[in-house]
Amino acid sequence: QSALTQPASVSGSPGQSITVSCAGTSSDVGGYNYVSWYQQHPGKAPKLMIYDVNYRPSGVSNRFSGSKSGNTASLTISGLQAEDEADYFCCSYAGRSTWVFGGGTKLTVL
Amino acid sequence: EVQVVESGGGLVQPGGSLRLSCAASGFTVSNKYMSWVRQAPGKGLEWVSITYTGDSTSYADSVKGRFTISRDNSKNIVYLQMNNLRAEDTAVYYCARVEMAVAGGYFDHWGQGALVTVSS
């Protein structure tokens, strides 16, 4: 149950697009289409942003999108806004009724 | 409105025990899978445990044999009994509702968390 690998930080200017990667293995990210992404503002609970690789829950902006290629998943945020500044965590089902999260990526909007 | 509210956190000595509660509203826990996820100070999220509607359970290796997840359907509450606590169990513990597919799933509603501090 090793954590998925995310970059520690990414940054972008308002209006730009950024992508956060999430590297796993064939036992988690690569083996299942059950990758989800969570946004967490300081001192707050995580919020679901993407599920099943590329689906958005109701109420989440269409500026957020997800994808997967092999053992790596990605979260893309387009049209960056100041309110997007937060920590982002990926998560994957890892088989045998277990889940694994990434270490988190801090997004800074310059 | 779907809500989950954790309680029961606090300071406990190494080797001690604590029970967290997760009170649900807006849905019935008997119809949903429920999970606990923790976050150590300044660290990332770590999945801890899940309880299925048929009372099956699963645990992360780091807590297996020490933590027990259960539910009281009559009270609409999910519990996490934590025994033999270690310093590395210090974290904010989140209760989360799980939306499951055929296999796998995601955490669609989260509580605000309960802080557990293990220290002498």
Image (tube, coloured by chain):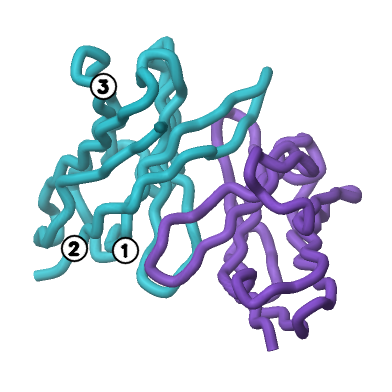
Dot 2 and dot 3 within a common chain: yes
Q: Which residue is mark 3?
A: B76
Q: Earlier in the sequence, mark 2 or mark 3?
A: 3
Chain containing mark 2: B
| Horizontal side, residue B32 vs residue A95: left or right | left
Chain containing mark 3: B
Q: Which residue is mark 2?
A: B118
Q: Quadrant of residue A83?
A: bottom right
Q: Which residue is mark 1?
A: B88
Residue B102, image x, y percentages: 68, 18
Calculate the distance from the C-alpha at mark 1 to the C-alpha at mark 3: 30 Å
Find out whether the residues at labels 1 and 3 contact each other: C-beta distance under 8 Å: no
Residue occupying image coordinates x 31% and y 61%:
B91
- Numbered disc 3: secondary structure: loop
Circle 2 crowding by C-alpha within 10 Å: few under 14, some 14–19, many from 20: many
Residue A58, image x, y percentages: 65, 38
Residue occupying image coordinates x 82% and y 55%:
A72
Give the residue type at disc 1: Glu
Residue occupying image coordinates x 25% and y 33%:
B23
Find out whether the residues at labels 2 and 1 contact each other: C-beta distance under 8 Å: yes
User: Which dot, 2 or 3, sits closer to the camera?
Assistant: 3
Residue B100, image x, y percentages: 59, 25
Quadrant of the drawing holding the C terminus of chain A: bottom right
- Residue A79, relative to residue A27: is it above or below? below
- Residue B35, relative to residue B115: is it above or below? above
- Chain letter matching colour cyan: B
Give the residue type at disc 2: Val
